Image (spheres, grey):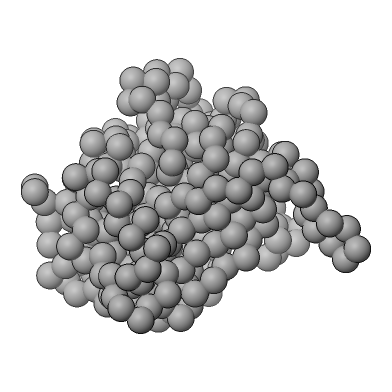
């Protein structure tokens, strides 16, 4: 296998997606419409999307078990030969992490998350990153995530980190590309102007800071603080699980192919827009030509 362009590090697990008309509450039962199982975890989702786009990827993160869910993960990853699985560790006695996601008719999700904190982690070394240009990282873990961010950044990789929204977060100075969720920012900083918040983050990271906002305008700042906006196409959302992972994959595809930030944003938005139309974070992937056509139909505009 040729050298991996992107190293995806973080969550590897299974998503149990349950479609329902609403959420259960005391004395209010809910009768699900569907119940299905999918590859899950930000790192695994990102790796599969990138592989489907033809990008060589190496994947690692939490250890998975020698159990039904662990075998399911390996089987699904094997469908993409350009994913280097040499650092995906399957171990006896470990319970494979999984998430139960209740998805309502608007495509939004409510999560119950099992076993990710308890699962052992594969610790990165500089040698593992040899040949990679980008490190795609989620922060839903412990100190090993911060160590990975610092290691990748200091090794000269562009670090693409999701939801590093706290100005005081120790990973922010090691973040080359922050891909943040506007609703997540508002949840943690009620009343905040998300664009001003992005500028505050960018003043610390000196990198790219992108704020997605569901069907609303995406806002991006480049390394010089120049702003761009792009309006996602209107789609019928079925399941938003993994939309951020798809967006990050499309963005990294563009950047890895030498596109500038505005064009790469179009690929990110196109991937995210395709993803929300289907169940599962990385189960139903678009044909490359259809994704390319949608990306080419979009345009990022300089911010006034």
Which x, y percent locates residue 4?
A: 17, 51
- Residue 238 lies left or right of residue 43; in this view the side is right
Task: Tell me what residue is drawn at x 61 percent, y 55 percent.
Answer: 101
Q: Nearer the viewer, residue 107 or 95?
A: 95
Task: Tell me what residue is drawn at x 56 percent, y 32 percent.
Answer: 277
- Residue 26 lies left or right of residue 260; in this view the side is right
Q: Nearer the viewer, residue 115 or 132?
A: 115
- Specify whether residue 46 is in view: yes
Task: Tell me what residue is drawn at x 61 percent, y 27 percent.
Answer: 235
Which x, y percent locates residue 255?
A: 30, 40
Residue 145, picture quadrant: bottom left
Task: Tell me what residue is drawn at x 19 percent, y 45 percent.
Answer: 82
Q: Establish if 270 lies above or below 165.
A: above
Residue 192, picture quadrant: bottom right
Q: Nearer the viewer, residue 87 or 192?
A: 87
Where, quadrant-wise, is the C terminus in this rendering?
Answer: top right
Q: Establish if 231 lies above or below 104.
A: above
Which x, y percent locates residue 77?
A: 29, 50
- Residue 116 lies left or right of residue 101; in this view the side is left
- Specify whether residue 212 is in view: no
Q: Nearer the viewer, residue 222 or 149?
A: 149
**Looking at the image, which residue sits at the far right?**
27
Q: How many numbered marks, from 0 up? A: 0
- Residue 11 lies left or right of residue 134; in this view the side is right
**Looking at the image, which residue sits at the far left?**
2
Which x, y percent locates residue 195?
A: 61, 49
């Amino acid at each position: 296998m040729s050298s991996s362009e992107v190293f995806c590090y973080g969550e590897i697990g299974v998503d149990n997606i349950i479609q329902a008309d609403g959420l259960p509450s005391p004395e209010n039962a809910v009768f699900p419409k569907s119940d299905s199982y999918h590859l899950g975890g930000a790192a695994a989702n990102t790796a599969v999307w990138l592989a489907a786009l033809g990008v060589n990827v190496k994947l690692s993160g939490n250890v998975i078990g020698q159990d039904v869910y662990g075998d399911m993960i390996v089987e699904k990853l094997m469908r993409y030969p350009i994913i280097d699985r040499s650092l995906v560790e399957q171990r006896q006695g470990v319970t494979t992490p999984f998430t139960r996601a209740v998805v309502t008719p608007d495509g939004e999700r409510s999560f119950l998350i099992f076993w990710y904190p308890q699962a052992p982690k594969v610790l990165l070394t500089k040698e593992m990153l040899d040949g990679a240009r980008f490190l795609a990282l989620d922060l839903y873990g412990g100190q090993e995530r911060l160590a990975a961010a610092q290691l990748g950044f200091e090794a000269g990789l562009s670090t693409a980190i999701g939801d590093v929204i706290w100005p005081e977060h120790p990973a922010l100075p090691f973040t080359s590309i922050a891909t943040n969720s506007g609703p997540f920012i508002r949840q943690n900083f009620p009343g905040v102007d998300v664009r001003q918040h992005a500028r505050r983050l960018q003043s610390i990271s000196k990198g790219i800071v992108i704020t997605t906002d569901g069907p609303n305008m995406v806002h991006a700042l480049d390394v010089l603080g120049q702003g761009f906006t792009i309006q996602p196409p209107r789609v019928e959302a079925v399941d938003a699980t993994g939309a951020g992972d798809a967006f990050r994959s499309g963005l990294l595809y563009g950047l890895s192919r030498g596109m500038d930030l505005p064009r790469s944003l179009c690929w990110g938005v196109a991937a995210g827009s395709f993803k929300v139309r289907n169940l599962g974070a990385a189960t139903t992937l678009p044909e490359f030509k259809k994704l390319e056509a949608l990306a080419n139909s979009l345009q990022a505009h300089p911010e006034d």
